[in-house]
Structures are given as structure tokens and as C-alpha cells.
Image (cartoon, coloured by chain):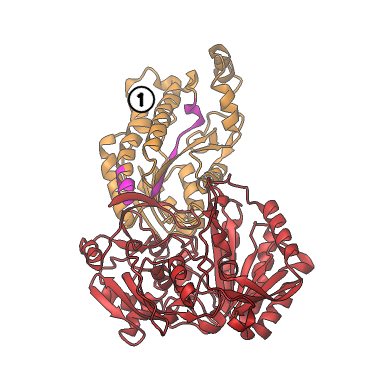
Amino acid sequence: MDNAFGQPQNVVVLGGSSDIARAITKKLCAARAHTVVLAGRSQELLDVAAAEAQEYGATKTDTVLFDAEDPTNAKRTVSEAFEKVGDQVDLVVVAIGLLGDQLEMEDDTEAVTSMVMVNFAWPVVALAEVRRRLVAQGSGRILVISSVASVRVRRSMYLYSGTKAGLDRLCDGLADSLEGTGVSLHLVRPGVVRSRMTQGQLERVPFTTGVNEVAENVMRGLAKGDRVIWSPPVLRYVFAVLRHLPAPLWRKIMDGGLTR
Amino acid sequence: MTRTTLYGWGRTTPSVANLANPDSESAVGEQLATGAALIARGLGRSYGDAAQLSGGLVLSNLALDEMGAINEQGVVQLGAGVSIDQLLHVSIPQGWFVPVTPGTRQVTVAGAIAADVHGKNHHRDGSFAQHVLEMRLVTPSGTHTVSPTKDAPLFWATAGGMGLTGFLTSATIQMLPIETDKVLVDTERFADLDGVMAAMKERDHLYKYSVAWVDCMTRGAHMGRAILTRASHATASDLDQVTLKAPKPTKLFVPFDAPSGLLNALSVRAFNELWFRSAPKLQENEAQELPTFFHPLDGVRDWNRLYGKRGFVQYQFCVPEDAHETIVKAIARLSSSGVASFLAVLKRFGPASPGLLSFPMPGWTLALDLPVGPRDLPGVLDDLDDLVLEANGRIYFAKDARLAPEKVRAMYPRLDEFLEVKSRVDPRHQMASDLARRLQLVGK
């Protein structure tokens, strides 16, 4: 169960070996999380993440393997993860995403398909199953890792930005649908985060943070029950302005070399 | 049966369950027969998640509100959902008071038994269940009539058992005779914690009721300054005019949720200062109405909304007599952390009840209301838990919404005995609650 401070005990992490997910899992375990099931594509990486969770206080960990390019396995993956928890699930973290190189991908239909599957289709199908199960249990929270890139889609990364935007906007409606069910959905919109995913890319972007800072902001947001968690928090105001800029100015700032 | 969001009084951990209102013992039996996980709920005055069960079945006892006549010996049979408020309306005019009352009248008889509540007379009279002569309990294995002499193990597992042994339908209580509707109160103000604790140790036994309000926000020499109020029932010869009037209904209420953060370190400090300064240095034999003395919290309905949307936690622990230092350390830790806490309630406990999971133990108890919000609050309370554990003390389940499950067993050494009795009447652990799940009190 969640306690009065929003600290969950039983946690499922979809995309459990990503750097952001690992940082969040560690902090959850240091608080009250004792059962953690991590789902991801590499057993090796999941084992590392699971060992880390134990080091930080988890007493029971397990893993589930899945391929995020194939949404037909999403239901099975979620079911397996819930069953491995073996109790009510207090928090489901959805931390699945592919950044890719826009210029290499944009004319390659296979790469575009992957982007849609991993960033949008798989999480959406998984969320349907997560939603069904949590609503039935009458409690639980869903934490979806989106991105500030989803707030306004930009030319230089429209595949990532756009697929994340789809997920982000869909989650808005999904969160509304959960009113009164005892379940809630929280969106995380981090700025650029130094991680394996962004290695070698997106350097020198303002408001870049590390994964631990994102995790810290997530913990605070969960404690407060924030519907949208920005990391760093100031991005909420930065993007309140940026999203309304005239298009030529937006292109100049975001894709004209000022941030890259 | 309706799907409903249920909260505790602290409003911190909502969950959704199917809520039903059985109005007879057989209706309760039918609900149990469905096999669904189930917990009873009264007026929802437990602060945390004791009377809720996410995804399960929550049975309200409020329809079981039959009240028998109070006989000449002051014995009365009450439906489980009768509140102390309803009871006092009838009983005070007849010259009877409840043997034990918590700080609010808005608790049901079954809730008072399930949490084995205590009042300002614990040092003399023990807890609520010690004045229960008999009760009816519907369990997954059938209906039981239990008393301290008839299936005593089940009686004492149910007293303080947080509803986890079954659903109470009625109880027979021994009431306390009173001659008037007043208490004679002595109020004393103390500049520090040592002063008030010494006074309580020396002279509490002279009074039927005793409680101290402690300021947990002042640091330095006046750390733990306190107001001690002690009282006994006024007899007819004590007063010029003798009355036996029922408590008046509460008119004031909080119409909406206050903004979170209204009660912060600054505003609470100011309140504490005002409260402290408005108390007399010493006042003796002041005649007070029963509700004024016993139920100050009932002056304003829905006062929990003052804490805003994020709610608040109440932290209450007790430690044995010799662990007087733990109280001092706990107050020092709180006052130095700067988390906002309203005047804490300090009280001496007398001998423990035989309740297997009953909270009180002979010694000291301290209770604090803390708004959720400050970032270091969860950590400060975890530290306090460790202090309490070190002193062989415990945390009160009826107040808790955040204790770590691994600390429960050491705090409640008779948990296994409790589970043995529970397994006898509820082998599949059908009776469960969010609290029981969170603290891993029962099997999954």
C-alpha cells in the first residue's frame, strides 16, 4: 500500500533497466518499496537493476523480459509483472522510450515503425492493461515518463518528440478517466537528461540534468500527488512561454543551432 | 452496494472499495459468505487506513444503531454502530457517563473496541475494552458471543484487533455513574517538560482524569512547555446548581478544504503561543461541562479539512515508565526539525489491557498532529520510530498511516498469539484492511 507520504511498497517498472527508471527505483526502495518487478529487454541489464534495488532496500525482486517493438506482448508483460508481485501493486512506472537519430530515421520506414511502436504503441497497450488491473484493485498509481520534448514537437527530433507527444496527450485523457477510481496517473516531463539514451547527443542544452535529479523531482511530485512532474521544475514556466512562440521564432531557437 | 472512495480522518491515503450497510447480523453473515475480503467501518475516525480496503468490501456498521435501556447497574447493550455521542445524549440525563472516552464523541462502540481506545482516565481505569462485558462478533467461521470469561482469547484478540477478527454487531458496556454533568478541573502551566512530567508522576493518581498539552515547537530552555489539566467528576455537593444535560450538537463546521500549507510552521507556532499564554498559571476547581473537558475536538465539525487537500498524520507512540527520556528526545528531535506540530498531547498510561494488539502500556504516551508537506517529515518520523523501538515502545495502529512493516513485530510482541486466534475464526484471512496489508499484519 501507499502510505500517507505517497511512498509505495509494491512496484512494477516497465522499462526497468533504463537509467531514469533505475534512479527512481533506487529512491523508492530507500523509502518503503520492498517488492520490485522490473520488465525490460535485456536480462543482463535487468539483473543489474534488480541487484541495485535490493542494495537499496528491496526484499523481493523479479524480472520480466519483453520486446517493446511488439505491442502484442504488452498485455502478457503487464500480467506477468503483476503476478510476480503477488499482491496489490501500488505504483507502475512506465519508462519506455527510444530517442534515435532523426536524420538517419526520417526516410526509413522501418525505423519510423520502431519509433511509433516503442514510444507510443507499446506503452499505450500496456497502460490499458495496467489501468484495468489497478481500477479493479481500487488503488494504485501510474507514473509515465514523458518528456518536455512532447510539449511542442520540433523539427530536429519530430519522431521522438511527436511519438512522445502522442503518449503524453493520451495520458492526459487517461488520467481524467481515472477520477474517482482510487487510481491516479502522473506524467513526468524531464528536460534533457544525461543518460545512456542521450549519450553523444543533445549536449549543451540548457536545463540539462542528471538522472538522480529527475528521480528526486519524481519523489517530490509523488509525495505531493502532482499530475504533471517537471524536471527541473522551472521547465514548466520555460515551456509555458516556448509553446506559444510564433513558429519562425520557435524554429530559430530550437533548431537553429541555439540549443545544439 | 456502491463503489466508494474511503479515507481515514487524516485524509492521506484514499482507496476505492465496495461499501455496504448491513442492518442485521444475518445481513453481515451474507456479506461474509460471499468470500470477499472485508473490513468493518464506523465513523471513519481512525486517522490512517484502518477502516478501508481497496478493491474489497467495506461494511459500515452505522445501520446497527439499536440502543438498549441502561439498567440500574449501569449496564447497557449497544448496537455496534452506536456512537459515543448518541449514547451520551441518552445516558447523561439518566446519570451515566461512558467509562472511557477518546477526544471525540464521534466514534462508534465497535470502533472504540477495535482500537481499544483510551481516554484521560487510562492511568486509573484502563482502556475501553476493559469495560466491555460481552460482545457479538460475526466471523467467517460463524457468530460468536465472547466476554472476558467466555472465549477470552477471541475477546482479547478482538479488543484492539483493528477489526481483523470479524465484524462486531453489538456490545454490552458497563457505564459510570455521575451525579452532575460537570467536572472540576485543575489547570497548571509549566515552563518546561521536566516540570510537567514530574508533576504528572507525583500527583496524577489523585485525579480521575489527567492530560497535558505540550508545545513541541519551542526550542531551548522552554522546550516542551506544557499545560496540565486534571479533573474529577463533580458530585452534587460540589455545585450550587446540579444539572444533567446532554451534549449540544456541534454547529460550527469547516465548509471547504483549506489551502494546503495554511497550517505551517509559522501559523502553528503562533497558535501554540496563543494557546499557552491564554492558559492560567494555576487554576483550581473550575467547573467545566463534560464536552468542554472531554471533547474539545468536537467543537468544530470536519476540522480535518483545515489541513488542506494533502491532509495530516497523527503520530502517537507510547513507551514504558522508565523510558521518560524517550519523550524528551522525541520532543527535542521534533522541535529542532522545525516540522509544524500542534500542541502535542502527553499522558500517563496505567496498566495495560489484556488485548493482544492493544496499544497502551504502563508509562507515557505522546500524540502529535502533523500536516503532510515538509520534505523531511517522513524521515523525522522514521527516526522517532527507532527511538520508540529502542525504548520497547510502540506506535498506535488507529493513528498510523506510515509505519514501516518491519518494525511492527518488535512493537507488538503478541502479534503471533493474535494471528493464532485470528486463524481459528478466519482461516483464509478474509478479514483484511489497507492498514493490515501495509503493515503486513495478516497474510496476503
Q: How far across and down, in percent of the image, does residue B404 sit? A: 48, 64
Q: Magenta segment, which residues?
A: A132-151
Single out the residue that lies furthest toward the right. Answer: B221
Indicate the chain coloured orange by its letter.
A
Q: Which residue is mark 1?
A: A111
Q: Nearer the viewer, residue A68 or B248?
A: B248
Q: How far across and down, in percent of the image, does residue B150 sit? A: 31, 85
- Numbered disc total: 1
Is residue A99 within the magenta segment?
no
Rendered residue at 54%/28% (across/down)? A202
Rendered residue at 45%/21% (across/down)? A158
Position of B223 with respect to A221 (left or right) is right
Single out the residue that lies furthest toward the front. Answer: B241
Which quadrant of the figure has residue A166?
top left
Rendered residue at 58%/76% (across/down)? B242
Q: Nearer the viewer, residue A129 or B357?
A: B357
The answer to whether one can see residue B365 in this image is: yes
Q: How far across and down, in percent of the image, does residue A213 sit? A: 57, 43
Chain B shade in the render:
red
Vertical relation: B257 (above or below) B148 = above
The answer to whether one can see residue A93 in this image is: no
Is residue A148 within the magenta segment?
yes
Position of A190 with respect to B154 (left or right) is right
Position of B147 with respect to B199 (left or right) is left
Q: Nearer the viewer, residue B46 or B371?
A: B46
Q: Residues within 10 Å of mark 1 (few under 14, many from 20)?
A: some
Q: Nearer the viewer, residue B73 or B444?
A: B73
Chain assignment, label 1: A
Q: Quadrant of the C terminus of chain A?
A: top right
Rendered residue at 64%/81% (across/down)? B238
Q: Type of residue at label 1? A: Ala
